[in-house]
Amino acid sequence: MLSVSGVDVFYGKSHALKSVTLEIFEGEVIAVLGPNGAGKTSLMRAISGLIPVSSGTVTYAGKNITNWKPEEIVRERIIHVPQGRRIFPEMTVFENIEMGAFSQGKKEKLKELYEKVYALFPKLYERRKQIAGTLSGGEQQMLAVGRALMASPRLLMMDEPSMGLAPIIIQDMYEKIREIARGETTILLVEQNAVMAFEVAQRAYFLDVGAITMSGRVSDLQHSDVVSAYLGVGA
């Protein structure tokens, strides 16, 4: 579905991504793991068209989408849930969810999408008239994901969905991610919480200082001594 091939990204003279290559097949959940500053967010922003790719290519469903405008990438149903949620705090929950549907055309489709989002996150229906900035951190993360789902993603990219959340809320969020994946949405998941990511992903890539250092099936990687030492997880 998505192929990132030899991608380089610079911030001025800083080399944020160094010849990064990865593949995602339809229906997979793929985790990208690594420490702070490894380039994980830069990778997502490059795929989304939010920062320029200096060299290399991003190919989606056979199309070269390298350096497309973000709105063009959204129309391809590649949807990005950014780190830090980035909701519209002065708007209501409903208005935030509605913003996710700007690329949708038919009203019949919108009704179906609202129902799906509210079925997945019942609290968003309960809070639909509430100002989004007054929600708890967990509820704001639900809102960010719900807004993204209104765009009918084929590929959903989630950047640190567990960040700043209590353990019980993280467990609930990851159950929702499993449910989204069961609905045949392909997911690219950037995380520092390797334990949770390993519970939902089939394959993982490790980024460090802008480069892929390791990759493979989660079933193999989670028993690796290297991974255990690197992230504190394992058998």
Image: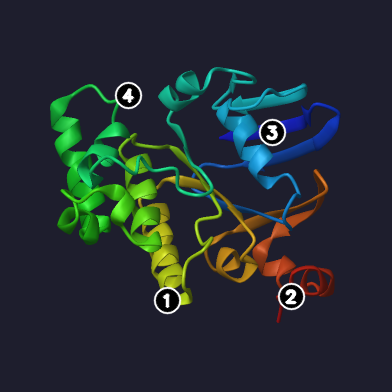
Relative placement, left or right, of 86 versus 15 is left
Q: Which mark is residue 232?
A: 2
Pinpoint residue 49: horizontal percent, then vertical percent. 58, 25
Q: CA distance from mark 1 to mark 3?
A: 34 Å
| Label 3 vs label 2, nearer the camera | 2
User: 107 and 38: which one is in front?
Assistant: 38
Q: Please state the total of marks drawn on the protein image.
A: 4
Which of the two marks, 1 or 3, is nearer to us in this view?
A: 1
For mark 3, give the secondary structure: strand
Q: In the image, which is nearer the foreground, mark 1 or mark 2?
A: 1
Q: Amino acid at mark 1?
A: Ile
Please tell me in which quadrant of the rendered image residue 18 appears.
top right
* Residue for point 71% across, 82% down: 235
Residues tagged 1 and 2 counted as in contact (Cβ below 8 A): no
Q: Residue at x 39, y 69 (%)?
A: 172
Vertical side of 67 occupied by 136: above or below: below
> Which badge, 3 or 4, comes first in the chain's sequence?
3
**Residue 211: x and y, percent?**
82, 44
Q: Which amino acid type is shown beneath numbered disc 4?
A: Ser
Q: Is residue 41 left or right of residue 87?
A: right
- Label 1: which residue? 168
Amino acid type of disc 2? Gly
* Residue 136 x %, y %: 35, 62
Chain-order first, disc 2 or disc 4:
4
Front one among 28 and 20 = 20
Q: Which mark is residue 103?
A: 4
Q: Is residue 25 above or below residue 191?
A: above
Q: CA distance from mark 3 to mark 4?
A: 25 Å
* Of the pair 5 and 92, the residue shown nearer to us: 92
Residue 170 vertical position relative to residue 89 in the rendered view, above or below: below
Residue depicted at 64% across the width and 66% down the height: 194
